Amino acid sequence: MRFATYRHDGGTHAGVVAGDGLHPLPEGTTVLGLVRTGLPTALALGEHALGAPAVPIERVRLLPPLDPPTVRDFVTFEAHVEGIAGGVVPEWYEAPTFYFTNPYALVGAHDDVPVPPGSRAFDFELEVAAVVGRDGSSLTPAEARDAIFGYTILNDWSARDLQRREMKVNLGPAKGKDSATTLGPWLVTADELAPFRDDEGFLSLEMRVSVNGTEVGRDSLAHMGWPFEDLVSYASRGTWVRAGDVLGSGTCGNGGCLAELWGRGREVPPLAPGDVVEMTVDGLGTIRNTVVAGPDLPPVAPARRRTS
């Protein structure tokens, strides 16, 4: 089943996606609330909602499917790391690495995305995200697999020039990453993707990204270094994950972002206002965002230097 959050006739609604459009759930229902009820209850409520009249998708503005408490983003594609850095450090293989990004900067599947203030190297990142369906601490991979509610497409927009400066301080990324993250177009429940799982738990879903109609990258989600249950398990290790938490796969390889192409010697320009970035993942749908000019803000003040 596919759950969406959308704006229509001046209000925000949750609904079930079907061939004839969006079937609204009862007023006051949120997708985050559905996730917290658990997958069996959510599916039952969704089946009931399919009896309501549908709203055509072209008449609504799709919002991020849910308002997650936290967003973690991993780096699980070996080819991406190799392309960005020119090689893979031994530490990458030891455990899945992630950072926390900004849950207040989520944008919908077709929203415009401003260039971050001061950036001249704006980039996209093609990813898939899992949404946790129940609270848990120090989960085993088997427990984590059962705790995944569903999946959605994630575009981790990145200001590479800001990111590079930050990470030279051995901290971050921060402002290089927190301007926008696209989630959408909807949240697909885990049971729908079960036929795509292989024996090791990886999802065999083709991922594609284009800029202005020209394909830039293509990969398979099955090329992750760890399956999603390992990511959820690791995130919960010695702490908690909560229902609604979003965990990104990290950028796929083979052109999943411009920085990978730059690292491999490809001369492609960074994103500029007017560029249209479209991402499609089998079984999950398509997101399409237009880059627009960002705010013109004054430069950041440098630090006061010590005098003694």
Image (cartoon, grey):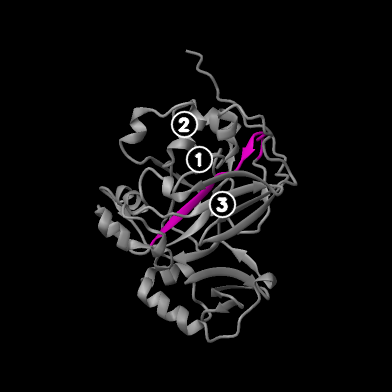
Question: Which residue is at a point 50% across and 40% down the rendered structure image?
Answer: 253
The span picked out in magenta is 117-132
Q: Secondary structure at mark 3?
A: helix
Q: CA distance from mark 1 to mark 3?
A: 25 Å
Q: Establish if 47 lies above or below 187.
A: below
Left or right of residue 24, residue 246 in this image: left
Q: Quadrant of residue 175?
A: top right
Viewer-side residue, 84 vs 164:
84
Q: CA distance from mark 2 to mark 3?
A: 28 Å
Q: Earlier in the sequence, mark 2 or mark 3?
A: 2
Q: Secondary structure at mark 2?
A: helix
Res. 82 mark: 2
Res. 253 mark: 1
- Three-letter code, disc 2: Glu
Question: Which residue is at a point 35% across and 49% down the rendered structure image?
Answer: 231
Q: Establish if 271 lies above or below 43.
A: above
Residue assigned mark 3: 105
Q: Establish if 33 lies above or below 288.
A: below
- Three-letter code, disc 1: Gly
Question: Which residue is at a point 69% across and 70% down the rendered structure image?
Answer: 58
